[in-house]
Amino acid sequence: MNKIALITGSSSGIGLATAKAFADNNIDLILCGRNENKLQELQQELSKKVRTTILYFDVRDNQQVTSAISSLPQNWKQIDILVNNAGNAHGLSSIQDGDISDWDLMIDSNVKGLLYVSKAVMPLMVERKSGHIVNLSSVAGKYTYQNGAVYCASKRAVEAISEGMRLDLTQYGIRVTNIAPGAVQTNFSLVRFKGDEERANKVYEGFEPIQPQDVADAIVYAINAPKNVTVADIVLYASVQSAPTTIYRKSN
């Protein structure tokens, strides 16, 4: 019987790439997100390889999360892998000029949303004394950069939560992996800059950024590690990146 993975934010970016990589590894999929059309398209594509089902919810809403996951049929509740991928960045400004609504969006998604989903899934893993949780942090969770204090704080919280999960869950045979990517070319910057495509595109100019598939490959490596190994933390930088905001770009 195939393993079952639940992936949040699976309709785009790293979540989408991870779903495809898992399907290639014969892992059945619970595809989660808010974009019904994209999730249905993805389900249609991947159901040719593995069993798939869809859950629609916003990770920021605990009631939606709990209701959706509890609604899974019994044969889908044996979740072997949880990938907490959903999250976002909103705005780039000094902390004194920050928009509180942006702060709320980042903390509610990146921190509280991760906790809500994990809270719904962890008891199922504890009961079976088996499972693997993969949390998507960021290099911003390891090194704070100017004008990104609250986003960096939210990702540093993910780092702390990953460590805490490992302390609490290892005794139940549950492995916890923290993945901290650097500059990944997704819609991250488009969301951060509120749809300003010109500004978002400049983020990736002059160098070759990490691709979502690169992060998915790291996740697959972690979940396929031997049973006697826990891959606790993976940091991924673009090859010309040495810190979150230090990138050696080609001059025009």
Image (cartoon, rainbow, N blue to C red):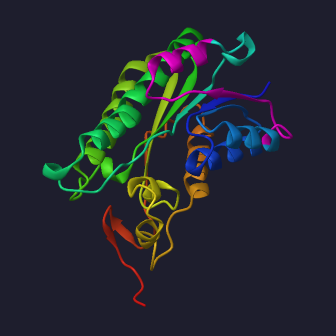
Q: Is residue 180 magenta?
A: no
The span shown in magenta is 46-70
Q: Which residue is at a point 77% across and 28% down the rendered structure image?
A: 2
Is 173 or 35 nearer to us in this picture?
Answer: 35
Q: Quadrant of residue 170?
A: top left
Q: Is residue 147 left or right of residue 212?
A: left
Q: Is residue 195 left or right of residue 13?
A: left
Q: Which residue is at a point 48% across and 40% down the rendered structure image?
A: 231
Is 171 or 63 nearer to us in this picture?
Answer: 63
Q: Position of residue 89 (x, y in %)?
A: 38, 48
Q: Quadrant of residue 150?
A: top left
Q: Is residue 71 above or below residue 210?
A: above
Q: Quadrant of residue 248?
A: bottom left
Q: Which residue is at a point 60% across and 29% down the rendered structure image?
A: 81
Q: Position of residue 229 (x, y in %)?
A: 52, 36
Q: Is residue 63 visible?
A: yes
Q: Is residue 137 left or right of residue 75?
A: left
